[in-house]
Amino acid sequence: MNAALNALRHHVSGAIERGEKKAIVEQSAPKLDIEFTRIKNDTNGNPRYVCHFLSLNTRHELDTMGGQVSEKYALAVKRANRIGGRKYHCKAYGGGIVFQCYGAADIVPAIERVLAQDQAAQVQS
């Protein structure tokens, strides 16, 4: 049995034991609680926000990659690049991803979309 089916079997049996009556697909996904820090504007005066790179990793990646921080960071930067984020090179905020946007709430739906796409790709493979 592949790992994805085994994980699903474990989750379903745990849900039955806990007495959950609602199917997984019927439950809405929890909203991400990402903490953004406002930093100085870029050279053109556009506002910028920074979040920690672990906000762009899925729960599965955080659990399975162990202590391989460089791989988690590279994956988060790759995801951020798809939605306009960049690696933040600053000693004051290590491991940051910077987004140029007019409000931190504007970028959260894009992060949720990218994480959902990558999570679906992981389940299929």
Image (cartoon, grey):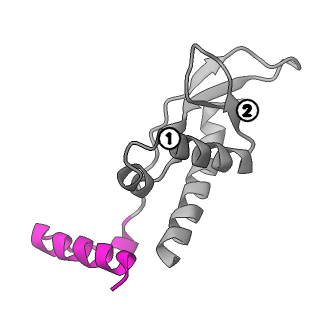
Residue corresponding to mark 1? 55
Is 43 magenta? The answer is: no
* Residue 33 image-quadrant placement: top left
**As drawn, is 56 to the left or to the right of 85?**
left
Q: Is residue 99 left or right of residue 109?
A: right
Image point (54%, 37%), residue name: 53
CA gap between label 2 and label 1 equals 17 Å
Q: Nearer the viewer, mark 2 or mark 1?
A: 1
Tell me the SS state at disc 1: helix
Residue 15: in magenta span = yes
- The segment highlighted magenta reads 1-27
Q: How many marks?
A: 2
**Vertical position of residue 39 compared to residue 104: above or below:** above
Q: Position of residue 47 (x, y in %)?
A: 74, 23
The residue under label 2 is 101
- Residue 10 seen anywhere in this rendered image of the structure: yes
> Element type at marker 2?
loop
- The 10 Å Cα crowd at callout 1, few under 14, some 14 to 19, many 20 or more, is some
Q: Nearer the viewer, residue 57 or 40?
A: 57
Query: Residue 51, position in %: x, y?
Result: 56, 31
In the image, is residue 101 above or below residue 14? above
